[in-house]
Image: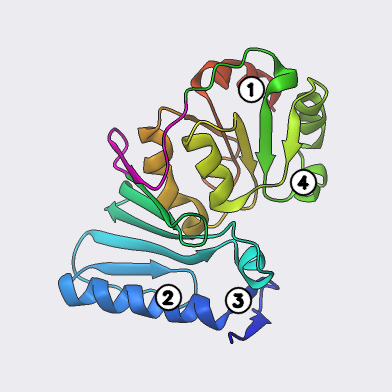
Amino acid sequence: MFKFWNKEDGTLVTSVDLQIERLLREEILKQYPDHSIHGEEEENYIGISQYCWILDPLDGTINFSSGIPFYGVLVGLCYGEKIIYGSYRLPSYNNIFCAGDGSILSNTGFSLKERSVSDWKSRIVLTTDESRIQNSRFSNHWKELKDLGPYVRTWGDCFGYHLLISGNADVMIDLSLKMCDILPILPVIESAGLKVVKLSPDGISDILVCRAELEKELNSIFRE
C-alpha cells in the first residue's frame, strides 16, 4: 500500500513517485555517472557532462492515487539546453511505451491511427484542468475554441498527449507546466508530426499541441 501527501507547493505526491524516481536515478548513474539529472521529486544531481536527464516518475499522480489508469512515467534527455530524446510509458494502460527524437517515432502497445476529421463538431479537444484555463488570461480564447463545437474532455497529463500522438484526438492545451511535465514528451510530439503552439515567453509553461492542419487557425484564436 502506498502513502500520499501534499508537497509544499500543494501538489500531491506518493511514495511510489519517490520509489520510481530513485530507481531511475540509480539506473542512469550506473551507466552514465557523469550525467546530470533533473527530477520531479528529488534535488537536482549535477554532473560534469552536458547531458541531463529529465524525469517525471508519475505524470498524473492524482489519477494514480485515485485508481484511474491514465498516468505515466516520463523520461527525457537534454544535451546542453536542447531536449534531444523523450519517452513515456503508460504502465496501467496496456503498458504502452512511446519514444522519439524529434523525427523518428518508436512505439509498442498501440497502433498509430489516421485521423481524417474536417468538422470541429467531430474534433476532440483535451486539457488536464479546464478550471485552470477558465481562470487564466486565455479564458476568452478558450471560450472561442469551445464555441466551435468540439468535444471537450479532461483526459489530460501524458495520457492526453498520447491520444494526440496515437491519432485519437486533435488538440491538447496545458497551462502552468513544469519542466518535468512537458520536456520529456516534446520530442515524441514532434516525431508524431504534431505542432506545438507556445503560449508563454518561456515556451514550455503554457502550450497548445495540435494536428498540423489546425496550427494556423489555433494560432489565430489564441493570439494575445
Distance between the alpha carbons at the discs numbered 1 and 2 = 37 Å
Q: Is residue 118 left or right of residue 107?
A: right
Q: Amino acid at mark 4?
A: Glu
Q: Find out whether the residues at labels 4 and 1 contact each other: C-beta distance under 8 Å.
A: no
Distance between the alpha carbons at the discs numbered 3 and 4 = 21 Å
Asked whether 131 falls inside the magenta stretch, the response is no
* Image-quadrant location for residue 150: top right
Q: Find out whether the residues at labels 3 and 1 contact each other: C-beta distance under 8 Å.
A: no
Residues in magenta? 100-113
Residue name at image x 51 percent, y 79 percent: 16
Above or below, 223 against 203 in this view is above
Q: Which mark's residue is nearer the viewer, 2 or 3?
A: 2
Q: Which mark's residue is nearer the viewer, 3 or 1?
A: 3
Q: Which residue is mark 2?
A: 20
Secondary structure type for disc 3:
strand
Q: Which residue is mark 1?
A: 218
Residues packed near mark 4 inside 10 Å, few (<14), some (14 to 19) or many (20 plus):
some
Query: Which mark sits nearer the N-terminus, 1 or 2?
Result: 2
Query: Which mark sits nearer the N-terminus, 3 or 1?
Result: 3
Residue name at image x 25 percent, y 71 percent: 28
Q: Amino acid at mark 2?
A: Ile
Distance between the alpha carbons at the discs numbered 4 and 1 = 17 Å
Q: Which residue is mark 4?
A: 130
Distance between the alpha carbons at the discs numbered 4 and 2 = 29 Å
Query: Which mark sits nearer the N-terminus, 4 or 1?
Result: 4
* Image-quadrant location for residue 116: top right
Q: Which residue is mark 3?
A: 13
